[in-house]
Amino acid sequence: MPFAQIYMLEGRTTEQKKAVIEKVTQALMEAVGTPKENVRICIHDVPKENWGIAGVSAQDLGR
């Protein structure tokens, strides 16, 4: 059973998350030949102050 964990900065819409779930599911189905019923996706919304880029938080970078 494929299980994908996706980490993204907070702020995506529900529609965007649905699209990610659909497309990642499709990609796993095609790549490993698993039925979609076996695919699990977990999206982690990470607060911008908890995401670091080059020593600075994404929040401080205005992301």
Image (cartoon, rainbow, N blue to C red):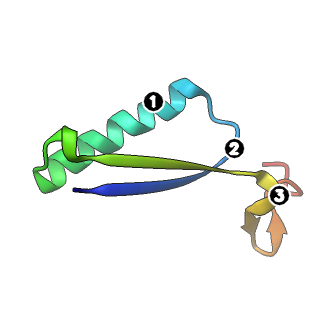
For mark 1, what is the residue? 18
Does 1 sit left or right of 24 as displayed?
left
Q: CA distance from mark 1 to mark 3?
A: 24 Å
Q: Is residue 17 above or below residue 8?
A: above
Identified at 51% across, 47% down, the residue is: 43
For mark 2, what is the residue? 10
Q: Is residue 20 above or below residue 32?
A: above
Front-most of residues 13 and 39: 39
Identified at 40% across, 38% down, the residue is: 21
Does 28 sit left or right of 48 as displayed?
left
Front-most of residues 10 and 2: 2
Tell me whether circle 1 and circle 3 mark residues in contact (CB < 8 Å): no
Q: Residues within 10 Å of mark 3 (few under 14, many from 20)?
A: some
Q: Residues within 10 Å of mark 1 (few under 14, many from 20)?
A: few
Residue closest to the far top: 15
Kind of residue indicated by mark 3: Glu
Front-most of residues 55 and 18: 18
Kind of residue indicated by mark 1: Lys
Query: Residue 16: x, y in percent?
Result: 52, 30
Q: CA distance from mark 2 to mark 1?
A: 15 Å
Q: Mark 2 or mark 3, which has the lower sequence index?
A: 2
- Helix, strand or loop at label 1? It is helix
Kind of residue indicated by mark 2: Glu
Residue closest to the far bottom: 55
For mark 3, what is the residue? 49
